[in-house]
C-alpha cells in the first residue's frame, strides 16, 4: 500500500512507563503503555496538570522515567546517551524557545552542527528548511528572533526541530501562544509538511479541536496520564469511552465530526433534473411537466452548474441562460461535511455537489448529513461492543 | 609652575604611573571576572548558594580598603601583591552578583529547548546561558573597574604601583612647592583614565554582545 511507503518516522513504544517524583506519594505518570505508530500524528490531550507533557518529555528523557521502558524504532531509548538520543528526536515547544542571541540561520543549524555536519551541507540545509516552513532565506536568514512575529518564530522553531531530519518529532503545545488565525495557518502547514515528511509526531495540547484537526490518533489522558481513550478522532467523537472523555470532547461533538468527513465519503445523489444551457425553454418545460418536477438545474457546456429555473418561469423565458436564479454556494467532493452543511443551510435544504473540475455530480441534502452521523455512531457503538 | 607645566615636566614619571595604575586595575578586574564567573556558575542553580556567595562578597566590600590593606601587609608584605589581592576581593561582589542575576534571568524555556535539542550541559552553559548573561556580567565588570580605579589610589599606602603615590605624597607635602600640582595631577589622571576605560567597555559591549539581545 502506498500509505506505508516514504514513511520516515519510526514507531515509539511505551511500556508500563511510570514517573514518580521523590517526596510525592502519587506518581505524576502511572503505568502508561501505548504504541505510537510510525509516520502518524498522535495527539496527547488532557486537562492541565494531567501529566501529558511529562509523558512526552520522557520520550526524549528531559524527564527520566522511574520505571518502564521506551523504545524508539526498536532501540531502547533509556540505554542511549541522553544527548545523543535528543539529537535524533526533534523538539519544538511553545513560544518556540529560540535562542535570542542567534540568528534564524544559526538557530536552525544548531543540531546539524552538534552532529558534526560540514559547513556547506549545513548552509544548504538551512535554506531548505526555511523554504519548507515558508520563510524566504534571503530575507530572514540573518534576522534575530525578536525581529520576527510570533508565527514566524514558531516556524523557525519547527525548522530547527526538523533540521537534522529526525524520524520523531515531539511538539509541546507549539501553537499555544499565537493568535487563532496564525494558529490555524500553522496547523494547516504542519499537515501539509506531514504529507511529505511522514514523521512520527507526538503532539501535546489541551485544545481538543486542535487534536481533532491534526491527529491521526488521539490519546485522551486523565489524572496521572492514565489513558481514557486512544483512538481515531472519528471514533472518539462518535463514541466517547467514558464521561471524562465526553466532558472533554465537549458540546458540539457532532459538528466537530462533520469537519472530519468529506463529501466524497457520503452518498450524494444525482437527483436533480439537468438541462444544457442551449436547450429551448419550451422543450425543458415539456420534460419537467412529464417528470412532474418544479425545478431544473441549468448546466453550461462543461456541465458546470449555472442556474436554478422554476417551471413557471419557463413559459415566459426566451432562453435558459437568463431564466431563474443563479446557483449560490456549491460544495465540491473535497469539501468537509461541515462546509457542506453550511451551504445546505444557506441554499435552503440542499446544495449542488461539484467534482474536481467544477462539473455537476449530484446533490446533497440535510438528511444525508444527519443519516451519516447516525450511521457513524451506530458503527462505532457496534465496534466497541464487539471488542 | 602651573599644573600643565608640572605635568609636562614630570611626564615620564606620570605616564609610567598612569600605565601601572590602569594595568593593575585591568589585571585585577580580569582575575576577579574569572573567579566571579566561576563562583556564579557554581552557585546560580541553588538559591542558598547564591545568597551565601552574594552575602560573602558583600561582607568583603564593607571592610574599609585602608583596613584591608593594613591587614594584608603583615601577611603578604608590601608592594603589588597586597594591592592586587585587595582589588580582586573588592571586584568580586559586582561581578559575582551580576553573573548570578544574569544566569538566573535566562528564560527557562530557552534552557529547556537547548537541552531538548541535544546540547550537553556544558554546551548549554557555554553557548546559551553565558552568552545570554554576558551583558550583565560585562556591566558588573564595568562597575568593578570604576570602583577599583579609586581603591587603587588607596593602595599606595601599601606601596603599590600607580597614581596613588602622587596623590599621597602631594597631600603629605601640603604647602611645599608643587605639592598641590602633584596631588591634582594624580587625581585628575585617575579621572581621565576611568573615562577612557569606560569608552573601552562601550566598545567591548558593541563587539561582543549579540545584536539579538542588545538593548
Image (spheres, grey):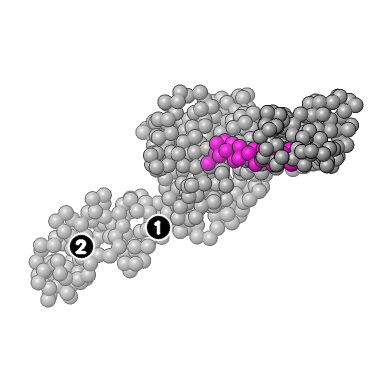
Query: Main structural element of the magenta stretch: helix, strand or loop?
Result: helix
The secondary structure type at the circle numbered 1 is helix
Q: Nearer the viewer, residue B136 or A102?
A: B136
Quarter holding the N terminus of chain B is top right
Q: Secondary structure at mark 2?
A: strand
Instruction: State which quadrant residue A141 falls in.
Output: top left
Q: Please name the residue shown 65% across and 47% down the image.
A: A50
| Highlighted range, magenta | B184-211
Label 2, label 1: how many angstroms apart (C-alpha)?
A: 23 Å
Q: Which residue is mark 1?
A: A338
Residue A306, above or below A324: above
Horizontal arrangement in the rendering, residue A323 relative to residue A170 (left or right): left
> Residue B138: horizontal and vertical position, in percent?
65, 38
Q: How many marks?
A: 2
Residue A57 visible in image: no
Q: Position of residue B201 (x, y in %)?
A: 62, 38
Q: Quadrant of residue A3?
A: top left
Task: Choose between B98 and A99: the one closer to the eye.
Answer: B98
Residue holding disc 2: A306
Q: Chain of mark 2?
A: A
Q: Percent position (x, y) of residue A115?
A: 52, 25
Residue A224 seen in this snapshot: yes
Residue B197, magenta (yes or no): yes
Tag 1 subunit: A
- Assess whether mark 1 and mark 2 are in contact (beta carbons under 8 angstroms): no
Per the image, is A204 magenta?
A: no
Dot 2 crowding, Cα within 10 Å, few <14, some 14–19, many 20+? many
The residue drawn where x is 45% and y is 25% is: A119
Amino acid at each position: 500500500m502506498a500509505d506505508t511507503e516514504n514513511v520516515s518516522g519510526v514507531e515509539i513504544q511505551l511500556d508500563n512507563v511510570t514517573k514518580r517524583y521523590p517526596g510525592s506519594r502519587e506518581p505524576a505518570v502511572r503505568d502508561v503503555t501505548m504504541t505510537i505508530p510510525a509516520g502518524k500524528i498522535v495527539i496527547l490531550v488532557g486537562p492541565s496538570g494531567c501529566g501529558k507533557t511529562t509523558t512526552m518529555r520522557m520520550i526524549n528523557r528531559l524527564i527520566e522515567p522511574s520505571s518502564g521502558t521506551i523504545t524508539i524504532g526498536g532501540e531502547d531509548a533509556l540505554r542511549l546517551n541522553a544527548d545523543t538520543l535528543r539529537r535524533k528526536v526533534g523538539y519544538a515547544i511553545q513560544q518556540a524557545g529560540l535562542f535570542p542571541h542567534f540568528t534564524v540561520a544559526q538557530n536552525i543549524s544548531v543540531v546539524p552542527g552538534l552532529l558534526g555536519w560540514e559547513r556547506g551541507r549545513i548552509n544548504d540545509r538551512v535554506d531548505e528548511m526555511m523554504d519548507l516552513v515558508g520563510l524566504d532565506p534571503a530575507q530572514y536568514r540573518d534576522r534575530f528572533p525578536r525581529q520576527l512575529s510570533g508565527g514566524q518564530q514558531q516556524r523557525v522553531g519547527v525548522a530547527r526541530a526538523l533540521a537534522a531530519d529526525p524520524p520523531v518529532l515531539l511538539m509541546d503545545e507549539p501553537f499555544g501562544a499565537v493568535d487563532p488565525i496564525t494558529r490555524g495557518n500553522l496547523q494547516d502547514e504542519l499537515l501539509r509538511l506531514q504529507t511529505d515528511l511522514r514523521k512520527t509526531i507526538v503532539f501535546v495540547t489541551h485544545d481538543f479541536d486542535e487534536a481533532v484537526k491534526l491527529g491521526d490518533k488521539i490519546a485522551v489522558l486523565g489524572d496521572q496520564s492514565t489513558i481514557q481513550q486512544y483512538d481515531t478522532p472519528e471514533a472518539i467523537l462518535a463514541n466517547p469511552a467514558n464521561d471524562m472523555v465526553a466532558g472533554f470532547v465537549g458540546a458540539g461533538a457532532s459538528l466537530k465530526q462533520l469537519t472530519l468527513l468529506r463529501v466524497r465519503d457520503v452518498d450524494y445523489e444525482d437527483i436533480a433534473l439537468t438541462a444544457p444551457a442551449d436547450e429551448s425553454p419550451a422543450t425543458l418545460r415539456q420534460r419537467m411537466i412529464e417528470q412532474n418536477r418544479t425545478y431544473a438545474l441549468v448546466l453550461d457546456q462543461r456541465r458546470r452548474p449555472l442556474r436554478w429555473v422554476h417551471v413557471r418561469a419557463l413559459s415566459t423565458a426566451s432562453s435558459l441562460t437568463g431564466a431563474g436564479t443563479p446557483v449560490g454556494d456549491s460544495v465540491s467532493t473535497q469539501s468537509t461535511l461541515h462546509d457542506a452543511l453550511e451551504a445546505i443551510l444557506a441554499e435552503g435544504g440542499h446544495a449542488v455537489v461539484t467534482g474536481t473540475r467544477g462539473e455537476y455530480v449530484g446533490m446533497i441534502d440535510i438528511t444525508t448529513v444527519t443519516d451519516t452521523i447516525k450511521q457513524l455512531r451506530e458503527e462505532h457503538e457496534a465496534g466497541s461492543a464487539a471488542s | 609652575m602651573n599644573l600643565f607645566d608640572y605635568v609636562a615636566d614630570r611626564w615620564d614619571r606620570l605616564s609610567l604611573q598612569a600605565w601601572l595604575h590602569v594595568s593593575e586595575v585591568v589585571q585585577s578586574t580580569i582575575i576577579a571576572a574569572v573567579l566571579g564567573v566561576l563562583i556564579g556558575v557554581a552557585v546560580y542553580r541553588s538559591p542558598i548558594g547564591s545568597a551565601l556567595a552574594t552575602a560573602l562578597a558583600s561582607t568583603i566590600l564593607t571592610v574599609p580598603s585602608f583596613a584591608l590593606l593594613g591587614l594584608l601587609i603583615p601577611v603578604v608584605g608590601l608592594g603589588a601583591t597586597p594591592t592586587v589581592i585587595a582589588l580582586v576581593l573588592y571586584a568580586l561582589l559586582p561581578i559575582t552578583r551580576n553573573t548570578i542575576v544574569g544566569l538566573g534571568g535566562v528564560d527557562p524555556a530557552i534552557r529547556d529547548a537547548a537541552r531538548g535539542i541535544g546540547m550537553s550541559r556544558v554546551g548549554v552553559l557555554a553557548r546559551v546561558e553565558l552568552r545570554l548573561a554576558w551583558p550583565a556580567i560585562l556591566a558588573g565588570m564595568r562597575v568593578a573597574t570604576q570602583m577599583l580605579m579609586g581603591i587603587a589610589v588607596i593602595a599606595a599606602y601599601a606601596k603599590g604601583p600607580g597614581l596613588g603615590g602622587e596623590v599621597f605624597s602631594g597631600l603629605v607635602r601640603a604647602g611645599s612647592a608643587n605639592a598641590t600640582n602633584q596631588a591634582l595631577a594624580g587625581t585628575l589622571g585617575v579621572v581621565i583614565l576611568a573615562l577612557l576605560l569606560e569608552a573601552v567597555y562601550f566598545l567591548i559591549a558593541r563587539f561582543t554582545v549579540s545584536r539579538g539581545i542588545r538593548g
